[in-house]
Image: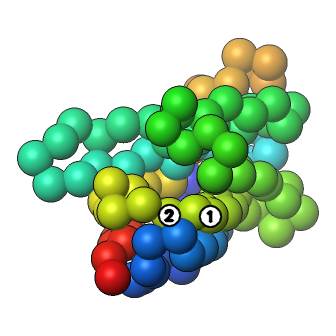
Amino acid sequence: QVQLVESGGGLAQPGGSLGLSCAASGNTFSIFSMDWYRQAPGNQRELVAAITSGGMTNYADSVKGRFTITRDNAKSTVYLQMNSLKPEDTAVYYCHADSDPSTMAVGDYWGQGTQVTVSS
């Protein structure tokens, strides 16, 4: 079992920046792929960024060049740095621990979510 706790959400102005963190419990963090999802009111939850156990990253087209996902396995933490924020980035952001074929990790764990609001 992996427990995920997000932090760092809040209010930012358009064009501003915010950083999210997601700390995982246990000592198996490094074997999972880690994702950030978001869900805006009335919308389906969507994948924002992903990072494999080996450090390969993938981004939604809507955030490419603005968001950066990183991980620190020693701290069992994944980060999402969000720059050049837009009002349409407003959503609840969720951390997710996912299966990773390269490590044979099997998982589907979610954090509780953290609100990000972009508004002037």
Secondary structure beneath label 2: loop
User: Where 120 sits versus 76, above or below?
Assistant: below
User: Where 60 sits versus 14, above or below?
Assistant: above
**Quadrant assignment for the C terminus:** bottom left
Q: Is residue 44 left or right of residue 1?
A: left
Kind of residue at badge 1: Asn
Res 73 → quadrant: bottom right
Which class describes the residues within 10 Å of circle 1: few (<14), some (14-19), or many (20+)? some
Colour scheme in use: rainbow
Tell me where residue 81 appears, x and y as whole percent.
66, 63
Kind of residue at badge 2: Leu
Q: Residue at x 86, y 32 (%)?
A: 54
Task: Check whether the beta carbons of the residues at disc 1 and disc 2 lie within 8 A of each other.
Answer: yes
Measure the alpha-carbon separation of dots 1 and 2.
Answer: 5 Å
Q: Nearer the viewer, residue 70 or 73?
A: 70
Image mark for residue 64: none
Q: Which residue is mark 2?
A: 85
Secondary structure beneath label 1: loop
Res 79 → quadrant: bottom right
Image label count: 2
Q: Residue at x 71, y 16 (%)?
A: 101
Tell me where residue 85 appears, x and y as whole percent.
50, 64
Q: Which residue is mark 1?
A: 83
